[in-house]
Amino acid sequence: MGYLIENGFSLVGDGWSDGAICVSGDRLSATVQDARRINAHGLLVLPGIVDVHGDAFERQIMPRPGVRFDTRMALLDTDRQLVANGITTAFHGVTVSWEPGLRSIDAARAFVRALYALRDRLSCDTRLHLRWETFALDAVAEVTEWLSLTPAPILAFNDHTTGSVLKGNIARKIGQMAERSSLSRDAYMDLLARVWDRRDDVPDAITAMAASARERGNMLLAHDESSPEDRMQFRSLGVHSCEFPLNIETAQAARLADEDVILGAPNVVRGGSHNGALDATEAVLDGHCSVLTSDYHYPSPIHAAFKLADGNMEATARFWPLVSANPARAIGLMDRGSLEPGHRADLILVDAADKHHPEVVATMVKGKFVYMRDLLGSQPALEREPA
């Protein structure tokens, strides 16, 4: 049995269609037999959101500093948030750091075990994004093992240590960092000094980790690159996606090489970066950003796309790929991100009557409705008998 989604406006290719969307099994199809009919009158039918970088799940694990909840419970709660916000594929960005506490190797180990034990129960296609802090040298062996997991994780190279030491970032973040590590400020600074003493070992560790990932076929990202020279260096290691570049020159260098630039959707929704980084709206409009992610806020991808479009349907069709087709392509998931026959049936029905606050009415993942707000009610969409 499948579904026939009728009477909506569907984003097909780079434009809108009022034709029916056919779902047969877990795939989109040109036709469907024995279909349950969904009346999507007044709704937009959009490809599901592909979120390649999100760590808002941390709030379900540790909603307050030092207050920790069961990881599996946190993942199940996060799953409900994801599909309610139209996210059908999510890569949870788990940080593997030298810090103790929330972002420690022990916490990452527990998270990885929980995710892979639980993922078949989750509605969203939930995967792993390993955010390896390049100064976490003692974690190299274990992170390398995780690269062989199925489905394969993304590996991102992160360096928040150099900025803390050389750029003085620690001064404004020491409270937050110490709290999440359950350390006093003095103890945190002592630990940072010991980690910094091993800085000469970091370049070789990065090279070895990149080689291991390339051998296994993992997609690679570089986080917080600060210059075109950084981009060139990581490109030489097989890293062809630039995640959260710190300035426009670095983003330009990536886009000129036809590489993806990944920025946060909350940056668009809020009207700028919360920490003074690159303005994502300007980057998108100038062609310097190709992918938007949830970063730390799951409602932001859908709201960012609609904010950029400002109620214009043609613009909505242009900006929606920032959260669907483009991220899917960037991480090599070519079976999703657009409403094409043969692709996974990952889609969402959206009530966009209020252009500033679009609402997800229903979410379908792999041919199954996993979230429904009003499909069985009186409006705006009704399920009917099989055709």
Image: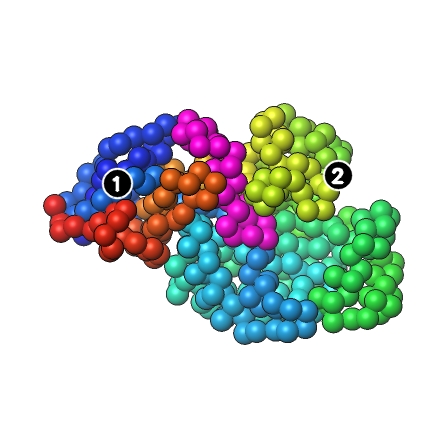
**16 is higher (above) or lower (below) than 243:** above
Looking at the picture, how far across and down is residue 105, in whole percent?
67, 66
Q: Is residue 178 left or right of residue 131?
A: right
Q: Earlier in the sequence, mark 1 or mark 2?
A: 1
Looking at the picture, how far across and down is residue 265, in whole percent?
56, 43
Rendered residue at 25%/55% (across/down): 377
Q: Main secondary structure of the magenta part?
A: helix
Q: Is residue 380 left or right of residue 110?
A: left
Q: Is residue 164 left or right of residue 33?
A: right
The amino acid pointed to by label 2 is Ser
Residue at numbered disc 2? 226
Rendered residue at 51%/59% (across/down): 149
Residue at numbered disc 1? 41
- For the question of whether residue 152 can be seen, the reply is no
Number of labels in the image equals 2
Q: Residues within 10 Å of mark 2 (few under 14, many from 20)?
A: some
Nearest to the observer: residue 265 or residue 92 = 265
Q: Residues within 10 Å of mark 1 (few under 14, many from 20)?
A: some
Rendered residue at 87%/61% (across/down): 193
Q: Which residues are magenta?
A: 293-319
| Res 292 quadrant in image | top right
Q: Tell me the quadrant of the picture where the C terminus can be found.
A: top left
Foreground disc of the pair 1, 2: 1
Q: Is residue 197 left or right of residue 323?
A: right
